[in-house]
Image (cartoon, rainbow, N blue to C red):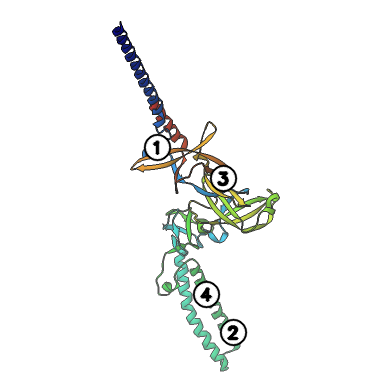
Amino acid sequence: MTNIFKIISALLLLLFLGACTNKSTQTNDKVEKISKPQETRINIVSLQQRQLDVMKIKLGKIKYVNLGNTLKVNGQLELPPQRKASVSAIVGGRVKSVAVIEGDYVTKGQVLAKLNNPEFISMQRDYLSAKSNITFLEKNYMRKKTLFKDGIASAKSFQEAEAVFNQAKLELNATKANLKLIGLDIALIEKGKIVSTVPIVSPISGNVQKIDINIGKFVSPEQEMFDIVDNAHLHIGLKVFEKDIDKVKVGQKVTFALTTKSEKIYEGEIFALGSAFEMATRAVKVHAKIIGTHKGLLSGMFVEARIVASNKKVNALPDGAFVTEKGLDYIFIQRKRVKNKIEFEKIQVNKGVSDLGFTEVVFINRMPKNAIVVTKGVYYVNAEMQKSEFADED
């Protein structure tokens, strides 16, 4: 009886240990299943460069932008009158050649085109005839002057010779000035080298903005042929309303962006205030020079600007760099790049003040120096990350 009891007790003990082992195994499996998603890198997404190109995803760096107390104004990029020129012919003619195309940079005095006109030949012939005749008239004048002094010639005869000589000299100088004005070389003409074309030259250095001629076209003297602009001297013309003009001073900094390209911020500085109101708008024109690069800026472009009343420079990103989920704000930063494969991490940030298409970004954790951030197309990157998460769950 005692042996039977010992055998039953041993069997019960084995059953108990087996049950504990199964329970432990099931518990471990459950823990492993729970912990597995935690080990998945749910905040990382990898994209190929071609995906970025197709989805037009742009990358950039965090900017240090002035988002302090500002006065919002609108304006336009302008050039002073000395830095733009409309080119026309002094004398009309038919276009023989055009030496430039729109966008070309030209220097002052550079030939833009050449014109043909028989009148050019006549003007040179008249000059040579007048020059030849002036020699005879000068000799006649000097001879009469000598005879008059000697009492041989009358005063009337001397005065007539003097008048004819002076008139011929005046006409010669006028003809010479006309030839110079239309761009002909007097020295070559005096050597007998008559040309049938005249050059049209640029009066300033700058870029060719517009061309209104072509080969074979006849142009009249009043017709504009070219527009030349020197964009190196671009400045901003801002309209400040009457109620705000007392807040504006020479030397204040200006930040501005093109209305068609708000993600690019430029800087300027006010150098002049208008002295009269535009009656239609009750606004005063304020002029600001552009600091730094003029790349991408052309005369006539419209701008949105902020006149800085107080400085507050902060870390900022374009408004399109943020994505919001469940009331929290996130951005994507580039973690590493191997050939054409780029890895992005989604990190939580806080947003501050916004202006001019930029928003202050406040980082919760320390950011790597010169971090590269997704500045455009962030929703596509986020969508790719969510697709990766769904694939992991499956």
Q: Position of residue 71 (x, y in %)?
A: 63, 49
Viewer-closest of 343 and 321: 343
Tag 2 residue: 159
Q: Tell me, for residue 173, which label it has, or none.
A: 4
Tag 3 residue: 356
Q: Tell me, for residue 355, which label it has, or none.
A: none
Q: Secondary structure at mark 1?
A: helix
Q: Secondary structure at mark 2?
A: helix
Sequence-first tag of 4 and 2: 2
Viewer-closest of 246 and 18: 18
Structural distance between the alpha carbons of marks 3 and 1: 27 Å
Please tell me whether residue 371 is drawn above or below residue 330 in the rendered image. Answer: below
Sequence-first tag of 3 and 2: 2
Q: Is residue 390 left or right of residue 278?
A: left
Q: Residue at x 68, y 48 (%)?
A: 281
Sequence-first tag of 1 and 4: 1
